[in-house]
């Protein structure tokens, strides 16, 4: 903040440590703020929700044009596999393309499929804790928070440990890093773009083989479900399915990992809340919702105005971009009582962390299941867990994903 006037600078290291003072200042002083970087920033709950819900006036817009904003109009966006893939994932599509692919994906990723995953997700959580419980300590982020959703996503897609080799997981990680760059509204460094291109080519070939195998030998997994999904225009092509599979991994991995890391940290910054969860682990589902509200792992998302539209006291012109800060809306005192207090039994309005409208998170049920199982299991099996709050390190490599790179925890070895 310069001279106490709120200015949005996503590269400010302080913002990555604690963005909430700036979010509060923006909400109070200039809730629909025009950043010097050339886009609008919305921070009030109602404005953020409006942008996400209002499909007449806001959408993803022209992907190619959005990318050329960083490189210039001559940049051949689609000649790069990484950008071509990003341009095709349904998150970045508007209707009707978005409607078709999302409809086919939800035929495969049903509530029943997620509910049936429960015992396997529980087994994954237990297996990860079995590996560390005797030692009395773990580095939460790398030994639990990252591994848990990786294994859950592999299970969901139906990838065996042989299929999900280290090369595949490394390439999926790269694809996830690719998707960040667009969220962060900045350009790739040339060498990173070259690597991202080759990893996407590799993954498309890999998933092509998986789908071919599932057609010959169907299984009860999402890869088979995607092959079978069909509407009046027919099924998804192999290329579309590979795009979806990589996209699901990208959308569901870091977000969930950070929900777990941010959650354990919050539960120990407010130790009475951890004590409450240990006393009654059935609070884990409601604790997960409060974690998502209080420390959303996805800070915001972007939209483009289709026409001139009024938001708050400002006019957004057609083609302009709006950064909708869900994490700022989640702390809006107009909506949430005492928004800076972490209360795992909080009742009342819903947080915005899964977005809203036609792009509402397609994996929300799975993320909720993962949160519920992770926190129930930790509270039941490690009631004496002590998290070293001072060991927490917030990631510094971007602004849009809020999560930790390190967090230490210990307990009496069992
Ligand atoms: C705590 C975990 C998660 C959070 C905080 C989260 C958050 C979000 C948000 C905010 C959006 C909307 C983005 C926008 O409107 O621009 C979204 C969309 C999406 N999420 Fe999640 N997500 C999580 C977990 C997952 C999981 C586990 C999956 C996959 C199984 C997933 C798959 C998707 C997909 C495919 C979309 C795009 C939906 C569409 O465009 O119609 N997410 N997520």
Image (cartoon, helix red, strand yellow):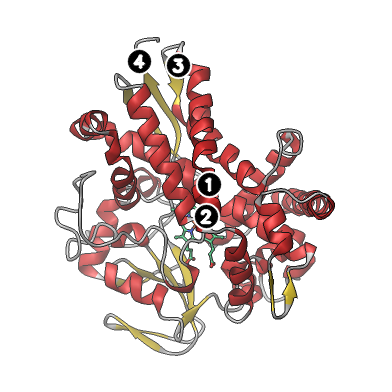
**Residue at the spot x=38%, y=57% of the render?**
353
For residue 324, which numbered disc appears in the image? none
Residue 347 horizontal side relative to residue 239, left or right: left
Foreground mark, 4 or 3, reads: 3
Which residue carries the number 3 mark?
A: 133
Residue 372 horizontal side relative to residue 110, left or right: left
- Please tell me how crowded label 3 is: few (under 14), some (14-19), or many (20+) other residues with Cα within 10 Å: some
* Residue 375: percent from left, percent from top: 37, 35
Q: Are marks 2 and 1 in contact (CB under 8 Å)?
A: yes
Q: Nearer the viewer, residue 249 or 339?
A: 249
Residue 220 can be seen in this image: yes
Q: Are marks 4 and 1 in contact (CB under 8 Å)?
A: no
Which residue carries the number 4 mark?
A: 411
Picture quadrant where residue 403 is located: top left
**Residue at the spot x=29%, y=43% of the render?**
287
Foreground mark, 4 or 1, reads: 1
Residue 174 horizontal side relative to residue 295, left or right: right
Image quadrant in which the C terminus is located: top left
């Amino acid at each position: 903040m310069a001279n106490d006037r709120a200015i949005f600078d996503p590269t400010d290291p302080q913002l990555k440590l604690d963005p909430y003072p700036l979010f509060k200042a923006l909400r109070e002083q200039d809730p629909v703020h025009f950043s010097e970087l050339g886009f609008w920033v919305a921070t009030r709950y109602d404005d953020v929700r409006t942008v996400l819900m209002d499909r007449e006036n806001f959408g993803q817009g022209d992907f190619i044009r959005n990318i050329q904003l960083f490189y210039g109009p001559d940049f051949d966006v689609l000649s790069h596999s990484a950008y071509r893939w990003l341009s095709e994932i349904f998150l970045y599509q508007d209707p009707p393309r978005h409607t078709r692919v999302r409809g086919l994906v939800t035929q495969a990723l049903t509530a029943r499929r997620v509910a049936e995953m429960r015992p396997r997700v529980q087994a994954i959580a237990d297996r990860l804790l079995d590996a560390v419980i005797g030692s009395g300590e773990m580095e939460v982020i790398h030994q639990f928070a990252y591994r848990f959703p990786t294994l859950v996503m592999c299970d969901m897609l139906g990838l065996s440990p042989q299929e999900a080799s280290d090369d595949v997981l490394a390439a999926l990680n790269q694809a996830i890093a690719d998707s960040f760059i667009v969220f962060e509204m900045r350009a790739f460094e040339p060498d990173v773009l070259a690597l991202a291109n080759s990893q996407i080519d590799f993954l498309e070939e890999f998933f092509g083989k998986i789908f071919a195998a599932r057609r010959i030998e169907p299984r009860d997994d999402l890869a088979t479900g995607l092959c079978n999904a069909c509407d009046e225009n027919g099924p998804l092509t192999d290329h579309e399915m590979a795009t979806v599979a990589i996209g699901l991994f990208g959308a569901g991995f870091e977000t969930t990992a950070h929900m777990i890391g941010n959650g354990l940290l919050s539960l120990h910054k407010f130790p009475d809340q951890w004590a409450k969860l240990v006393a009654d682990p059935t609070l884990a589902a409601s604790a997960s919702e409060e974690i998502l509200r209080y420390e959303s792992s996805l800070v915001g998302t972007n939209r483009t105005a289709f026409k001139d539209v009024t938001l708050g006291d400002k006019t957004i012109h057609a083609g302009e971009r709006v950064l909708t800060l869900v994490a700022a809306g989640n702390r809006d005192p107009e909506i949430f009582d005492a928004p800076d207090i972490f209360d795992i039994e909080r009742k009342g309005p819903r947080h915005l962390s899964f977005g809203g409208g036609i792009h509402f998170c397609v994996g929300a049920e799975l993320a909720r299941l993962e949160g519920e199982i992770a926190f129930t299991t930790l509270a039941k099996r490690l009631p004496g867990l002590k998290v070293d709050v001072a060991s927490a390190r917030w990631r510094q490599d971007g602004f849009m994903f809020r999560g930790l790179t390190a967090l230490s925890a210990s307990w009496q070895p069992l």
